[in-house]
Image (cartoon, rainbow, N blue to C red):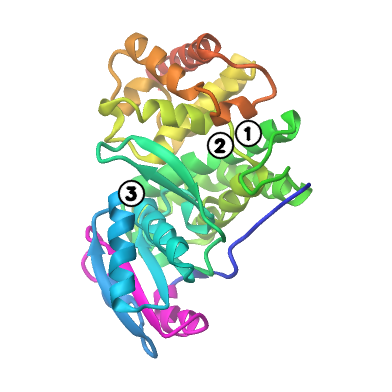
């Protein structure tokens, strides 16, 4: 069966937080807003809750089993009829998982564009040490995704770069799933629409990513910024979920096993994972170098050292073992992959990336 799924409503633009009240009122009256306690001063002040009974709780950016249970308990005590997650991917995933547990509508309000999490029906659950435990697949996508481009442009440009890194994987992974016949994230095989959306995502970020990062560094969102923002959140969200995931994110899971990588953002790890996926698939040195140069141009990693991993030879077997364990998404690739093959791909990508890094 070909399957696809999407958020019910997507709203993006300057000042979108001012539309929170009327947009959310379509879904209910009493909302719990989970807001990242690290939000910059003034962001919450722009959230228009007119017409709603809205209760805001500042939370740590952590989607753990304990945090989900605490949020569920709090929501039941308060009697809310919907939950909103406002912040980065971990806060959004926390709200998504709690809303799913309670069968409540969920509103996704990203304040950074660091990943394609906002539109999906997937919550990544971590342990207390920051290691990925499992992916939790919730019953439906967000009822509303509200993206204020002014807020995201005011955030450090590193977050947008990370979102570009996450989105960079979308087409390569979806295409691997199409070629192998692997299932997508929503329980079937990819539609032609999903594959096309994934390709548009890649084309957009390769063409406009550099300009978008420049605009973010200036804090002045322009047309390129809006297009790349749509690509990193909406196009990538649809593309990965309805297209499928594969080696780049499996390599991310392996990198996340290493404590020294925990200072790197999700999309930064995925960006290097893309280079390793291309290496795994037998792409030419020139093609891998082309993508590595793009990574450099938008401040993304090109080698393991860029992720804080100093001893690549010691790290590679750990990453490869985690990435290739039974049931991992690396097995969606159109070839058999074991730990040795994965390690060879990581080593080649790291060496090519270091060569690009030295040349500048």
From the image, tell me which residue sits under label 3: 65
Secondary structure at numbered mark 3: helix
Measure the alpha-carbon separation of dots 3 and 1: 31 Å
Residue under numbered circle 1: 172
Magenta-drawn segment: 15-43
The label on residue 169 is 2
Q: Is label 1 in a helix, a strand or a loop? A: helix
Q: Is residue 180 left or right of residue 304?
A: right
Q: Do tag 1 and tag 2 residues touch (Cβ < 8 Å)?
A: yes
Residue at horizontal 38 percent and vertical 26 percent from the top: 255
Q: Are marks 2 and 3 in contact (CB under 8 Å)?
A: no
Q: Residue at x 35, y 45 (%)?
A: 158
Q: CA distance from mark 1 to mark 2?
A: 5 Å
List x then y, in percent, for residue 169.
56, 37
Is residue 169 or residue 354 the one in the foreground? 169
Q: Earlier in the sequence, mark 3 or mark 1?
A: 3
Residue 338: in magenta span:
no
Local secondary structure at mark 2: helix
Reply above or below: 331 against 318.
below
Q: Is residue 17 magenta?
A: yes
Choose mark 3 or mark 1, whichever is in front: 3
In the rendering, which numbered label is found on residue 312? none
Mark 1 neighbour density, 10 Å: few (under 14) some (14–19) many (20 or more): many
In which quadrant of the rendered view does residue 265 lie? top left
Image quadrant where residue 268 sits: top left
At x 67%, y 44%, the residue is 243
Q: Is residue 148 visible?
A: no
Measured in 3D between alpha carbons, the distance from the residue under mark 2 to the one under mark 3, in whole angstroms, is 27 Å
- Numbered marks: total: 3
> Badge 3 local density, few (<14 within 10 Å), some, or many (20+)?
some
Give coordinates of residue 71: x percent, y percent. 31, 63
């Amino acid at each position: 069966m070909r399957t696809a799924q999407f958020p019910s409503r997507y709203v993006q633009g300057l000042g979108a937080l001012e539309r929170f009240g009327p947009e959310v009122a379509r879904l209910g009256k009493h909302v719990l807003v989970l807001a990242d306690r690290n939000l910059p001063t003034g962001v919450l002040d722009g959230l228009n809750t007119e017409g709603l009974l809205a209760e805001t709780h500042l939370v740590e950016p952590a989607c753990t089993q304990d945090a989900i249970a605490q949020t569920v308990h709090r929501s039941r005590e308060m009697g809310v009829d919907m939950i909103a997650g406002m912040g980065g991917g971990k806060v959004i995933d926390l709200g998504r998982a709690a809303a799913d547990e309670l069968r409540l509508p969920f509103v996704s309000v990203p304040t950074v564009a660091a990943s394609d999490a906002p539109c999906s029906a997937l919550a990544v659950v971590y342990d207390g040490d920051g290691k990925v435990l499992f992916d939790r697949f919730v019953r439906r996508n967000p009822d509303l995704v509200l993206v204020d481009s002014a807020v995201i442009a005011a955030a450090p440009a590193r977050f947008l770069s990370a979102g570009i890194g996450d989105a960079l994987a979308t087409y390569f992974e979806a295409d691997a799933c199409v070629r192998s016949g692997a299932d997508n994230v929503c329980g079937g095989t990819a539609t032609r629409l999903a594959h096309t959306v994934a390709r548009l995502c890649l084309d957009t970020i390769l063409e406009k990513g550099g300009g978008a990062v420049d605009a973010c560094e200036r804090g002045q969102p322009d047309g390129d910024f809006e297009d790349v923002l749509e690509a990193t959140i909406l196009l990538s969200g649809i593309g990965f979920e309805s297209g499928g995931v594969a080696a780049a994110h499996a390599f991310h899971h392996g990198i996340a096993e290493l404590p020294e990588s925990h200072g790197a953002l999700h999309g930064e790890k995925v960006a290097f994972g893309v280079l390793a996926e291309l290496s795994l698939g037998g792409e030419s040195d020139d093609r891998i170098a082309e993508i590595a140069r793009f990574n450099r141009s938008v401040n993304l990693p090109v080698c393991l050292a860029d992720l804080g991993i100093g001893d690549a030879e010691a790290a590679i077997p750990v990453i490869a073992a985690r990435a290739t364990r039974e049931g991992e998404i690396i097995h969606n690739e159109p070839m058999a992959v074991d730990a040795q093959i994965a390690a060879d791909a990581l080593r080649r990508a790291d060496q090519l990336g270091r060569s690009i890094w030295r040349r500048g």
